[in-house]
Image (cartoon, rainbow, N blue to C red):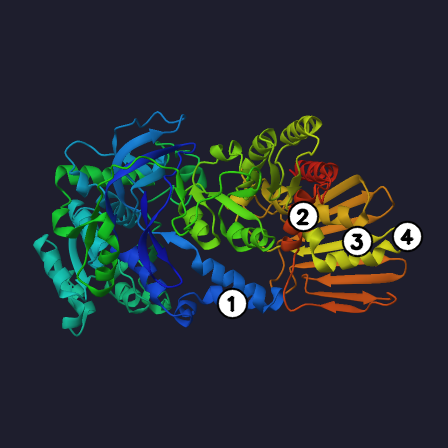
Amino acid sequence: MKQLQININTGDVKTIEVPVPKVGSGEILIRSDYSLISLGTEKMLLDFGNASLWGKARQQPGKVKDVLGKIKTDGFATTINAVRSKLNQPMTLGYCNVGTVVDVSDNINEFSVGDKVVSNGPHAEYVCVSKNLSIKVPEGVEISHAPFAIVGAIGLQGVRLAKPQIGEKFVVFGLGLIGLITAQILKANGCDVIGIDINNSKVQLAKKLGIESINSTEMSDPVSFIRSFSDGRGVDGVILAISTSSNDPITQAAQMCRKRGRIILIGVTGLELKREDFYKSEISFQVSCSFGPGKYDSDYEEKGIDYPFSYVRWTAQRNIFAVLDMIRKGTMLIDPLISAQVKFENSPDAYTDLSKNGNTLGTILEYDTDKSMTRIIPNQQLSHKPPKKGTENKFCAFIGAGNFASRILIPAFIKSNAKMHTIVSKNGLSAAHAAKKYGFLNSSTDMDHLFDDKQIGILAIATRHDSHADIVMKGIRAGKNIYVEKPLALKLDDLEQIKREYEQANSKNESGTILMVGFNRRFAPMVRKIKSLIAGKKQPCSFIITVNAGAIPQDHWTQDSSIGGGRIIGEVCHFIDLLRFLADSEIVSNHAIKMLPKSNTELNNDIVTISLKFKNGSIGTIHYFANGSNKYPKERIEVFCDGSILQLNNYRSLIGYGWKGFSKMKSMRQDKGHNGSVHSFLNAIDKGDKSPISFEELIEVSKTTIEIAKFLE
């Protein structure tokens, strides 16, 4: 299928061939009929992409600060590589789609194949969307008008926050697509509405829709005009539907309001508020969040958990339906908002017009999708075909094409001369991008065929944590060698099942299957140096690992115990493995304490101290803290042994105190051992050696990690 993408680094917009998405739990697959280009949001992405690197930095000063901090701790080369990789990741465009349902997940009863549905899907021939961000199109609504309900819901949510009453007077700042819809909604609520814009054609269109409007550039004092419009009292509310960095609109809006007036922001504006503008009149100001409650809530969007109707009357989905109903009844006019209708294959040209034409409102993309739902796409950039004979078990397939896989893991496999076969991702876009960038033979959204393909001997797994155990077991049964990013499993039951599957498979296969977890830190050059230095000591060692982890929001997927496993299972496993490697001895006991949060909304299991005792007498402590400063090194390892000390800072410097023949080791580039980990894994396969990390150690470390996480619950 074809999908529209933007390269944020260059601003280039183009359609590319990607595999059709596969329906996941709580999702429906839609064959697109129409989608709507939203001038505001999509033009912002276009402008950001077309900006120079300096221009991008000026638009995101907070990100620049983060980059400078990362340079200090991780080094220039590592940081620049991360920034370039992030900018080169393709992004989907669009969020207003309508089409026909062609597939439904097993746990959905609300939709059936053949339904006409409007959704939050991107510009693509097929879109896969959560059920809570999809609505059946009511009879009486023209299909090409239905996508306007998505942007309309943005305006409606802003109006709901403004709480208009019949007879109140409102100003709508900005008469773009959302502004004109918002003005119509306010008018339908029985309000007197006046629109303000700097574009005369939009002002004239608003007047044709029956909305009194002014061009603010044609009058010396728009505030006085609005005060006159409100009989000198000031308007009851102002809705800002604009996109500007200027602070003037928020200042003018406050001056236009009556005492205790309301200002709602549904666009983008400068927010340097003047206290005197708000203080005397007790004006309230609120930012509206997209379509309404549920948007950006993973439980609502991804898990399909709805808010109770009695307690949250207007969710994102219900707002979309309300706008569809207004369109059906004719209280919201759509035809005047359509600037153009173009074929989807010509959509890049529509974006060229978008960046040049300031009069554009709604551009409809029309699809003629009659293709089969292909989920495996050959890489057209490769002129050769993969050899058919003598290639059994010679190729590597990747499951997962996120930022870490694309920036770190895939380059490490290529550096070790792995032959890349197929890369799979859920939505297909990232897989298609990685296939072209790194020379995979195919991109796909369906991993099931990988297990039966005899050419594929290696599976690399870089998906969300909750999927690891199941994919690993399927790979073991298929006789594949497996490199899985940490963690191996989230539950002890899954870990035990992996153990049974592995032992059963290897008892039947003399050559054996290699299972490797991405515990890369034990392969870092400076960690290897530490291991070689302490190997000559006869005394047990004391280890202290301090991790300045930084805070991650509680609603991030890694914090979800059912998906990411939380930060202990998801990340602290690295450091438990590192201590196991350095001590070179079995873990005999563990203990953990955590800082108790002041409330349920604060960090949980982000600030912990873990102690391990090893069979050879060594001890180790992990301080994993999310409450530190990013100016401090992210990771520090200290070793105390037989009158000597070693200190490693961020895998860039290693200092020895009292070590005969060693004092210092430095590197300009941070090396956490990713390349070494992958090389050791592939080398073991080539030579028929044992796994670089024994299966017993993988189970031991994983079991210890899960037990600690359960103890801290």
Q: Which one is in front, 650 or 610?
A: 650
Disc nearer the start of the sequence (4/2): 4
Quarter of the image where one finds residue 348: bottom left
In which quadrant will I find the N terminus? top left
Observer-side mark, 3 or 4, equals: 4
Q: Could you tell me if the residues under marks 1 and 2 are in contact, i.e. CB atoms within 8 Å?
A: no
Observer-side mark, 1 or 2, equals: 2
Give the CA separation, mark 4 to mark 1: 44 Å
- 10 Å crowding of disc 4: few (<14), some (14-19), many (20+): some
The amino acid type of the residue labelled 3 equals: Phe
Q: Secondary structure at mark 1?
A: helix
The amino acid type of the residue labelled 4 equals: Gln
Question: Residue 551: x, y in percent?
Answer: 57, 53
The amino acid type of the residue labelled 1 equals: Lys
Establish if 705 lies above or below 184: above
Q: Which one is in front, 713 or 683?
A: 683
Question: Residue 458: x, y in percent?
Answer: 58, 40
Question: On the image, numbered disc 3 is attached to which residue?
Answer: 543
Circle on res. 683: 2
In which quadrant will I find the C terminus? top right
Question: Horizontally, is 195 left or right of 441 in the view?
Answer: left
Q: Could you tell me if the residues under marks 3 and 2 are in contact, i.e. CB atoms within 8 Å?
A: no
Disc nearer the start of the sequence (1/3): 1
Q: Could you tell me if the residues under marks 3 and 4 are in contact, i.e. CB atoms within 8 Å?
A: no
Circle on res. 65: 1
Disc nearer the start of the sequence (4/1): 1
Q: Secondary structure at mark 2?
A: helix
Give the CA separation, mark 1 to mark 2: 40 Å
Question: On the image, numbered disc 4 is attached to which residue?
Answer: 539
The amino acid type of the residue labelled 2 equals: Asn
Q: Secondary structure at mark 4?
A: loop
Query: Residue at (15%, 38%) from the top-left corner?
Result: 142
